[in-house]
Amino acid sequence: MNRTIRGVIYAYSWQQKYDPSKATVVCLHGFTGTKQTFQLLQDPVYNFLFIDLLGHGDSSVFVHPWRYQLSEIVKDLNQLIQELEIKHWYVLGYSMGARVALAWAIEQPNNLCGVILEAGTPGIIDEKERKQRKEADQKLALKLWRRPLVDFVDFWQNFPLFSSQKNLPKQTQKKIRNERLSQNKFGLAMSLWFMGTGVQKNYWLELATLKQPVLYVVGEQDQKFLAIGNRLCQQLSHSTLVVIPDSGHCVHLEQPQAFVSKLSQWLAEKSIVSEDMR
C-alpha cells in the first residue's frame, strides 16, 4: 500500500489486517533495507506496520534532498500515523531506523506508547568526531553515486559491523543482498548525505525529554552499540537494556527467536503498566 504524505509517497504494509482495538508497532528498517526485513515479527496482541523509509524500497526516491533530513522524515511519519487513524503505537527501529525512531519520539511524541531501539545511536557528542563522520558519509555517498550499485553492496556487506552476518544461512544472506541490490543509488546517497550519523542532531542532549519507556536491544558481539546502549540506559531510568547472545549488529535477523521473545515480553509488561495507569 502507498500513501502520499506532503507530496512524498510512503510505501507500507500490515503484517495482518489492522485491528483498531490493538496497539500498533511501527517498524523502521536500516540503511539499504526495506519493510520486508521485519516480516518475521508476529504477536497476535499487536498490529505490526512496516514502512519503507524515504529513498528505500517502494517509497519515493527522487524528491528534494532536504526532505531526507530526519526532522522532515519524522514529520512525514507522524502525519502517516494520523492519516491511518492509529491511536496508540510503539515505534521499533533498527540501526538507521532506530535513529529515525528516536528522533520521532523526541520531536513528534503524540500518542507514542514506547520506543524500541535495535542498535541505534542518539548521535555523536564530540564536535570534531561528528565533523569527521559527516565528511566520511559524504565521501561514501559520492562513491556510491559514481560506481555501480553492486560495487557498493559488495563494499557495504564487508563492513566489520556486519561480519557476524556471514554466519547466517546462505538463503538469508542472499535475501539481504538482494534487498540491498533492489535499492536506487540516488535514494541511498541522499540518505547518507542528509540523514547520516554525521549530520544527525545530537539527541543525547534531549534524552531527558523522552518520557516513554525505552527498550534497547543489542547483540553481545556488537561492542560499539553495546557501549552506546549502556550509556543511553544509564541516562534513562525508564529504559531496559537487552543483550542478545551470539549476535552482532542485526539481532532481528541473526537471532530472530530471541529478538521476538524479548520484544513480546517487553511489550506485554508495558501494556500492563499502561492499563494500570488508566
Image: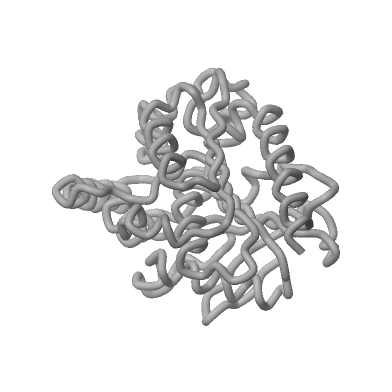
Residue closer to the observer: 59 or 113: 113
Compared across the picture, whether 244 is left or right of 160 comes to right
Image position of 74 with respect to 118: above or below:
below
Res 200 visible: no
Q: Residue at x 24, y 53 (%)?
A: 138
Image position of 153 with respect to 46: above or below:
above
Residue closer to the observer: 56 or 237: 237
Q: Residue at x 14, y 48 (%)?
A: 128
Circle count:
0
Compared across the picture, whether 151 is left or right of 25 comes to left
Residue 228: percent from the left, percent from the top?
38, 38
The quarter in which the C terminus is drawn is bottom right
The quarter in which the N terminus is drawn is bottom right
Res 153 visible: yes
Compared across the picture, whether 99 is left or right of 65 comes to right
Residue closer to the observer: 130 or 169: 130
Colour pattern: one colour
Image position of 265 with respect to 123: above or below:
above
Q: Residue at x 42, y 40 (%)?
A: 234
Residue 74: percent from the left, percent from the top?
49, 67
Which residue is most to the left? 128
Image position of 171 with respect to 9: above or below:
above
Compared across the picture, whether 127 is left or right of 273 comes to left
Residue 199: percent from the left, percent from the top?
28, 58
Q: Residue at x 76, y 44 (%)?
A: 268
Residue closer to the observer: 2 or 50: 50
